[in-house]
Amino acid sequence: MLQSFWSKPHIMAYRLIFHYFPGDSLLHRWDARCKFLGLALVTFGLLQMDEKALALFSVLFLGVVVSARLPLKPIMHDLKAWSLFLLCIFLVQAVGHPDSETVLAPWLPVGKSGLYAATLTCWRLGLVLCYGVLFTLVTRPRDLQCALIWFLNPLPFLPAQRIALMVVLTLRLLPLLMDQLEEVSLATRTRLGNQRRNILQRTKFLALPLFRRSLIRADELALALASRGYNENRPIHLPRIPLTHFMALVLIALSLVLCSIQASRLVQEVFAAITSFFLN
């Protein structure tokens, strides 16, 4: 039933990014607290990796998507929207990198090292974005809210439930806003509104309905919370993290340490120091 739902033409036009995709894989059933910490570790580790480790984690991302039975094609289609952002970063990194010895052309102030650094930066940011999207696809908003409350509860003078609710609502409203933008754009095209030469008029006919729908949705959400008796002081009890879930998090941390640039340099320095000690 779920596959037929996503195979409908009018649903495929919607974006999958930031949505929760139901499933029963190991990644779906992994504790949300471990998934949150794993995402933080992966994000930090990707920023320290070289091209070999990035290639490994790129293949790992594709394998995790396939094993979790997530629709790869819609995910890649949604990630194309970030290509312009990555292209801007690539150009700034390539042009701004100082390299006067290996300039490719006199009229082009870009060297080989600049292209290498720009490619590595965009590769890292792209993988960070991919793993962030993967986290939202396999984590239910309710589980994410409980995990954030669990992390924020030990911190004094912080409204943990309010902060967790705002984060979850932001993640929930972003895809709804994008879906509404798609609906309004489709309705405008069917009425030939995209053929207007005046850009201000086209913007008005696109922005005003979207703004109106967003206010209506926010009002409905506030009424829904009030009707369900939302209370920030309601206690939430979470079970302990299972040992197997925690061991999976430790395994991810060890793999990131082994693949990071800093760890490889440290191993090389230690090996060189041991070798010099025995040789001398």
Image: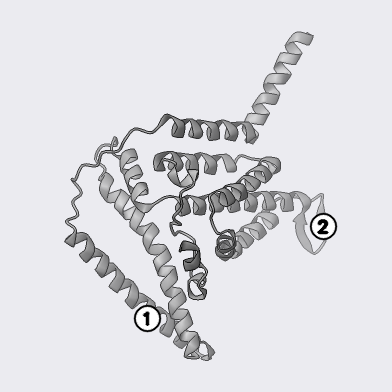
Residue sitting nearer the eye, 150 or 92: 150
Point out residue 60 in the picture as x, y percentages from the top left corner.
62, 45
- Residue 50, given in percent of the width and then of the height, sits at 68, 41
Q: Residue furthest front?
A: 1
Give the image location of residue 169, x and y in percent: 33, 58
Secondary structure under tag 2 reads strand
Question: The disc labelled 1 sits on which kind of residue?
Answer: Leu
Above or below: residue 12 compared with residue 109? below
The image's mark for residue 275 is none
Quadrant containing the N terminus is bottom left
Q: Is residue 234 left or right of residue 47?
A: left
In the rendered view, does 160 fall on the left or right side of 5?
Answer: left
Q: Residues within 10 Å of mark 1 (few under 14, many from 20)?
A: few
Mark 2, residues whose alpha carbon is within 10 Å: few (<14), some, or many (≥20)? few
Q: Name the residue rendered at 43%, 70% in the picture.
A: 179
Within the image, what quadrant is residue 256 found in? top right
Mark 1 — residue?
A: 208
Give yes or no for contact between labels 1 and 2 (Cβ–Cβ under 8 Å).
no
Q: Nearer the viewer, residue 90 or 152?
A: 152
Label for residue 104? 2
**Image height of 134 relative to 193, above or below:** above
> Which amino acid lies under the numbered mark 2 shown in the image of this protein?
Leu
